[in-house]
Every structure is written in structure tokens, then in C-alpha cells.
Amino acid sequence: MQVKICGITRVEDALGAVDAGADALGLVFYKASPRYIGFQTAAAIAAAVPPFVILTGLFVDAAQSEVDQALECVPLNLLQFHGEEGARYCEQFRRPYIKALRMREGLDVSAAMAQHPRARGFLLDAYCPSVPGGTGATFDWDRVPQNSGCPIVLAGGLKAENVAAAIAAARPQGVDVSGGVEQSPGLKDPRKVSAFIRAAKGH
Ligand SMILES: O=C(O)c1ccccc1NCC(=O)[C@H](O)[C@H](O)COP(=O)(O)O
């Protein structure tokens, strides 16, 4: 099971997550988030992270110039679009990307996935009307499509205590967590991070 720890704001949190076995880290470039970091901090984190860890840049309906600037300043391996971005917008950066789908009631997940034929995967997150992500809320894991033909990353309200059950129900390729491994918004708790990764990877 691949694990992404999202909302990293400090070098020590990045290194702690990598030591604990994280496969990917998420850097939030959405200014309204308590986990927002600027490009300078992001570049410092990127410089400290070993080469085989996937560094993901997260955006919510950002201006094209903002994503371009992030790509100039930070060596991101993957883009994560967490708003209402369409395929043409996401593809213009010519970088691997995953599209977040917020699981509001009635969402046709397969149809939403079909709108992004070039996405490398889909991150399925809980839907809360006023907050685009990092809400700590779960959704019904039985709604995760099986055999969709594209990697699924499960997110939303995961923590060490529920991630094994979530994986058993949704059978995703990866899991993503933010609030469930924090001591306070934006600051990771090393013990929670390592308990989460152990539980997700089944050891
Ligand atoms: O983390 C944020 O603050 C955030 C803000 C706006 C859009 C997305 C955000 N996070 C995206 C993630 O990938 C989170 O890990 C995911 O939403 C799950 O968060 P949580 O329920 O806190 O584990």
C-alpha cells in the first residue's frame, strides 16, 4: 500500500514521514489552508527529501501562472488538483497529475474520471461544501469504484485507527492523510505518522 502524507510544512516533518516509510509527500499551495507553504519553504523541503520520494504540489483552482511559478521554484514530481479544474487546464503543465474528486452525494465517479483521461490517478476525498480538503471528514468507502482501470488514492478522515478498515472496504492503490497525523493544523505528530504508515502497510 502506498502512503502519501499531505500538508507537510516543515523539513523535520518531511524527514520523519520518509523515515517512517512514506512514499509521497504533499505540499499545499492553497493560501486559505492552515497547511499552506510558500515556494521558498517548499524548495527547502524538496532539497531535504531523498530522490525516490514523490513530491506532490497541491493546488485548488489556482491561476496558471501560480502553478508555473511553483514548478520553476520547486522540483515537484506530481501535481494534485483539488478544485474544479478541467482536463485542459490540468494537462497544460505537461506534468504527471492526479485529480481530486470530492465525493458529494450523487457524484458519478466513473463519469468524473472519464473527464480526465490523462490523469495518473484519482484522489477520492470527502465532500464538505465550504472547505475543499483537509477536512478530517470520511465518506462511504463502499462508493469507491473497483476495477476502474486507474489508480485510486483514498483520502478523507483517515487515521491509524481506521485506515486498515478503509483499505479493506475500498481497496485503493494508495492512501492519503493530513489531519489524522497532526498534533495541530499544519504540524505533524511523528508518532501518529508512523502508526498510520504501519497500519496502512499492514506491519
Ligand atoms: O490539507 C489541506 O488543508 C487542504 C486544503 C485544501 C485542499 C486540499 C487540502 N488537502 C488535501 C489532501 O490531500 C488531504 O490529505 C485530504 O484532503 C484529506 O485530508 P484529511 O481528511 O485531513 O486527512
Image (cartoon, rainbow, N blue to C red):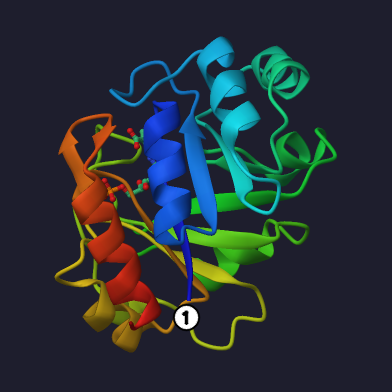
Q: Which residue does the image show at 40% across and 49% down from the upper left?
A: 17
Say whether mark 1 is within 8 Å of ligand 1.
Answer: no
Viewer-side residue, 100 vs 190: 190
Does the image show residue 7? no
Tally of numbered discs:
1
Task: Report helix, strand or loop for mark 1.
Answer: loop
Q: Which residue does the image show at 42% across and 84% down from the upper left?
A: 171
Quarter of the render that holds ligand 1: top left
Instruction: Establish if 190 lies above or below 21.
Output: above
Q: Label 1 sits on what residue type?
A: Pro
Left or right: residue 114 compared with residue 27 = right
Provide residue 20's location: percent of width, then percent of height: 39, 58
Does the image show residue 176? yes
Instruction: Establish if 11 lies above or below 135.
Output: above
Viewer-side residue, 96 vs 108: 96
Quadrant assignment for the C terminus? bottom left
Provide residue 42's location: percent of width, then percent of height: 55, 22
- Residue 23, by quadrant, is bottom right
Provide residue 103's location: percent of width, then percent of height: 35, 59
Q: Which residue does the image show at 39% across and 26% down from the upper left?
A: 9
- Residue 157, by quadrant, is bottom left
The residue positioned farthest toward the front in the image shown = 19
Left or right: residue 198 compared with residue 84 = left
Q: Which residue does the image show at 67% across and 81% down from the upper left?
A: 149
Provide residue 202's location: percent of width, then percent of height: 34, 83
Instruction: Establish if 168 lies above or below 94.
Output: below
Report the residue marked by disc 1.
Answer: 145
Left or right: residue 27 compared with residue 96 = left
Q: For mark 1, does the 10 Å Cα neighbourhood hold few (<14), some (14 to 19), or many (20 or more) residues?
A: some
Viewer-side residue, 27 vs 32: 27
